[in-house]
Image (tube, rainbow, N blue to C red):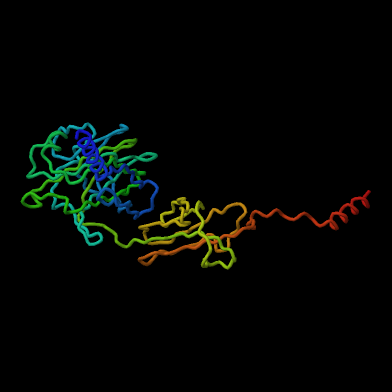
Amino acid sequence: MGRLCIAGALTGLLLAWAGAAVADVFTVELSDKWIGYVEHRGGVVYQRTDFGTSGSGVIDPVLALKSNEWEIWGYNNDEKNPESPHVDKTKTRSFTLDEVPLVTIAGDLYRELLLDANQAQGAIDLTELELYTVDNAPDITTLIDLRAQGTLVHSMDGGGDDGTVRLDGGGSGKADMFLYVPDAAFTVFGAEGTTNVYVYCRFTGNDDGFEEWAVLNEGHWNPELYDLKIVQFEDVDENGQLDSGESLLPDWDFDVLGPQGAPQSFTTGADGTITLKNLAPGQYRVTGDGKNGWKHTTLNPQNHDIESVGLDVAYFGVSHGAPMSDLVPEPPALGLVALALLGLRKRH
C-alpha cells in the first residue's frame, strides 16, 4: 500500500512537471538588425527603429537615466530625490495611461513606448524591464513600494523567463526601439487619466550619457513590412531554375545589404533557405559567398526591390565545377615559348 502511494505521488509529480510552463531564456538581438525588424517575445512586440530625430530636447521623456556607470537602473516618478542615483530627475516624470498611444497589430490593440539608447561604442543590454499601473499616483518612493502597490503589466523576466534586449544605441540622434504591450494587460483604475504608468528598467554595458523612455503623441507602428526568402539549390542541369528533384543546400553563406547600408551575414538552414522577416521597403542586394568546387548558375549578386506586401523569393543555383574566378590562367603555348627562345639566341 505504501509503495502504491509513493508511486502515485511520483506519477503526480511527473505529470505536474510535464504540464508546467517552460521558462524562456531569450535575447532579442536588435543591435545588428535592419530598421523595421520586428520580434514577438514574451507577449510583447519589439521593433527596431530610427524614428525621427530623438535625443535631448527633441522627445519628451518620461524616464531618463544619466550616468557613465556600466550598470544603471531606475523608474519614473516625480521625486526630487529619486532612489536610483542614475535617474535624471529633470527629465523624469509620472504619466498616465491616456498619454500612451494605441496602435493595432494583427487586429489587436497595443500600447506604444519609445526607447532611445545612447552608447559610445558596442552594444548595451536592457536586462530588466517591468511595467506597472498604479491607482491615482500614490506616494511611491522605492522600488519595493512600486512592486508592492503596483499592478504588474509586463515583466521581461516574468513567469520564470529571463529576457534581454540588445541594442547598439549608436548615439545617432535617433531612437532605437519601439515597445508594444497588449492593451488588455493594463489594469485601468476608474479612468485612464487617473491610472498611472510606471516603467522600471535596468541596463548593463552602458558607456555613455543617457537612456530615455518616452511616449509620443500618436502611435508609429508601421504595418507595411515584408519578407524575403533566399533559396540555395543544386542546379543539376544548369538551367538557372529550381526543378523538381533538385536539392536545397544547407550551410551556404550570404551577405545582405539593405536600404540602411549595413550589410549582414546569414547562412542557409537545414532546409537550404533563409527567411528575412519584417523588412522595411527598399532595395536589398543579396550576394552568395560561394564554395570551392562550385559555380553559380544564376545571377550573383541579385538586387530585390521590396515594395509589395508579401514574400519575395531569391533563387541561387550552383553546380559542381570551379567558378570562373577560381580558374588558373593557361600557360603560354609551347610554340610561342620556342619562338621567344629562338629570338633570344639570335640576339647573341
Point out the residue furthest to the left here: 190
Residue 169 showing in the rendered view: no
Point out the residue furthest to the front here: 1
Residue 338: x %, y % from top left: 88, 55
Q: Which of 328 and 65 is in front in this view?
A: 328
Residue 254: x %, y % from top left: 49, 53
Instruction: Indicate whether 90 appears above or below 189.
Output: above
Residue 239: x %, y % from top left: 58, 68
Residue 119 located left or right of residue 340: left
- At x 40%, y 61%, the residue is 282
Residue 172 located left or right of residue 74: right
Residue 295 showing in the rendered view: yes
Q: State which quadrant residue 131 falls in.
A: top left
Q: State which quadrant residue 120 falls in.
A: top left
Residue 129: x %, y % from top left: 24, 41
Q: Which of 112 and 298 is in front in this view?
A: 298
- At x 54%, y 61%, the residue is 317
Q: State which quadrant residue 275 falls in.
A: bottom left
Instruction: Indicate whether 20 appears above or below 105.
Output: above
- At x 84%, y 57%, the residue is 336
Image quarter hosting the N terminus = top left
Number of numbered discs: 0
